Image (tube, helix red, strand yellow):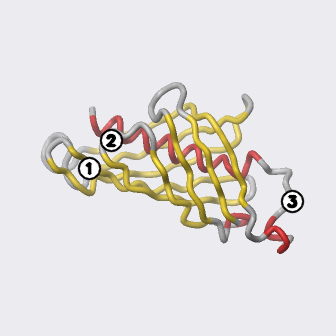
């Protein structure tokens, strides 16, 4: 059960970030206008349609190397704005304390966005680092914060530095 919860949590994280670019698809392109360098783009979204699969490697239950794969859809103002997917892998187990590493790729109308994070235990909130991207996001960095992870109220706030 603990691995399933971690997979859904990180799936939500993956899904949320990819919608960041799509939500402002009509905004001027930062890549075409150098005067927009150094700006912060803020997006707030809700998550839906999370799909996941767990792979229990080694001994039964949480163990080093166990993996989860996930995907989903982000929604802004009732409109689907993107999709994304990723994996998480258990990197530390100390009794009931399980830590996973998540790696996520998000496809946006304006390019792809990548992110990663460690997720300790069953935290209901999580910060993920934006590690780069393609297209308008080729120089992106920043943070995505998730709240109410693995609940119908799950939401995120992405702060992308261009």
In the image, which is nearer the foreground, mark 3 or mark 2?
Answer: 3
Tell me where residue 112 sits by quadrant.
bottom right
First in sequence: mark 1 or mark 3? 3
The residue under the point 63% across, 38% down is 74
Q: In which quarter of the image is the N terminus?
A: top left
The C terminus sits in image quarter: bottom right
Q: Residue placed at 27% from the left, 36% from the top?
A: 2
Q: Is mark 3 on a helix, strand or loop?
A: loop
Question: For the residues marked 3 and 2, what is the alpha-carbon distance in whole angstroms?
Answer: 40 Å
Q: Which mark is residue 66?
A: 1
- In the visual, does 64 lie left or right of 40? left
Label 2 sits on residue: 54
Relative height, residue 89 to residue 34 (above, below): above
Q: In this view, does 124 lie above or below 20?
A: above
Left or right side of 73 for 5: left
First in sequence: mark 3 or mark 2?
3
Which residue carries the number 3 mark? 28
Q: What element carries label 2?
A: strand
């Amino acid at each position: 059960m603990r691995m399933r919860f971690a997979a859904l949590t990180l799936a939500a994280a993956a899904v949320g970030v990819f919608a960041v670019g799509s939500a402002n698809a009509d905004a001027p392109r930062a890549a075409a206008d150098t005067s927009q360098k150094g700006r912060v783009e803020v997006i707030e979204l809700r998550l839906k349609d999370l799909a996941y699969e767990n792979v229990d490697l080694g001994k039964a239950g949480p163990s080093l190397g166990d993996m989860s794969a996930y995907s989903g859809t982000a929604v802004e103002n009732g409109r689907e704005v993107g999709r994304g997917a990723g994996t998480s892998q258990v990197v530390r187990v100390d009794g009931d304390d399980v830590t996973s590493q998540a790696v996520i790729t998000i496809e946006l109308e304006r390019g792809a966005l990548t992110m990663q994070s460690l997720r300790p235990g069953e935290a209901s909130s999580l910060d993920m680092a934006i590690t780069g991207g393609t297209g308008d996001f080729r120089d992106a960095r920043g943070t995505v914060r998730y709240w109410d992870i693995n609940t119908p109220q799950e939401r995120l706030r992405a702060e992308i530095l261009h």
